[in-house]
Amino acid sequence: GAVVSQHPSWVICKSGTSVKIECRSLDFQATTMFWYRQFPKQSLMLMATSNEGSKATYEQGVEKDKFLINHASLTLSTLTVTSAHPEDSSFYICSARGIGRENTEAFFGQGTRLTVV
Amino acid sequence: DAKTTQPTSMDCAEGRAANLPCNHSTISGNEYVYWYRQIHSQGPQYIIHGLKNNETNEMASLIITEDRKSSTLILPHATLRDTAVYYCIVRVRNYGQNFVFGPGTRLSVLP
């Protein structure tokens, strides 16, 4: 199946700093990428949808100035958590969808565990 | 997208078949049933999907009732590595839409 890779797998940062998470589609072109957040013992919650070359669409309650999303190419999207605070600590997951065989199922990255201290 | 209802948790003995039910009584004619699972601290993994016919792949079988109001995911020979949260999602087959995850079923495969 199609492969989506996230980096880093985990990161610890100090409060007030910014953290960038990368999501890459390794063997297909991702026209659309989705960013989810998952708190402990909860399900995945969609944060934003990004289409290559255009601005991301954010879900209600998600601050676009805090969670910067860049989808500059068909194989890479980045999520930057700016001025991180302890309440931003969570498991962040991206998924990608593209053309061809991958245009119906979504494939997910392995997730990034962010801990803000 | 139609809502789904799944049991909160289930246990299964290792080597036995795991049958995970899902109710989707408000499913529309153009909505597919998808199953994903999430092993602890990993991203969701695609398992299988179907419209109205039963489906089988190397991971599992999907049985959809004739009225399409419910389905069952079958793991024929569960192993300890199948312990995970299993999500049943109903949605239109459209590349532009995201997947909406409910709470899922926490399957524990016991030795």
Image (tube, helix red, strand yellow):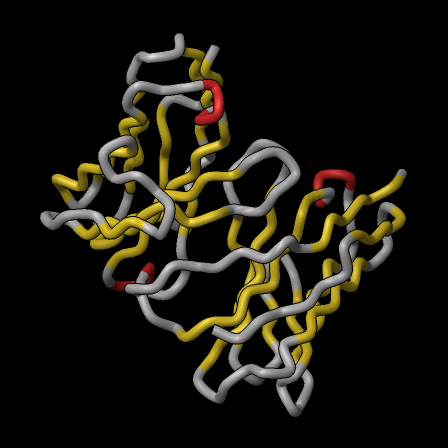
Rendering quarter of residue B38: top right
In depth, the one of A77 and A56 nearer the eye is: A56
Identify the residue at horizontal 52%, vertical 39% (top origin): A38
Residue B27 picture location, percent across and down: 55, 82
Identify the residue at horizontal 37%, vertical 65% (top origin): A104
Residue A97 picture location, percent across and down: 31, 55
Residue furthest out toward the front = A61
Rendering quarter of residue B108: top right
Residue A116 picture location, percent across and down: 45, 15
In depth, the one of B51 and A80 nearer the eye is: A80
Is B31 left or right of B73, judged from the image as shown?
left
- In the image, residue A5 above or below residue A19: below
In depth, the one of A112 and A61 nearer the eye is: A61
Residue B42 picture location, percent across and down: 55, 35
In depth, the one of A78 and A41 nearer the eye is: A41
For the image shown, how many numbered marks are present on the structure?
Answer: 0
Is B85 left or right of B76, judged from the image as shown?
left
Residue furthest out toward the bottom = B67
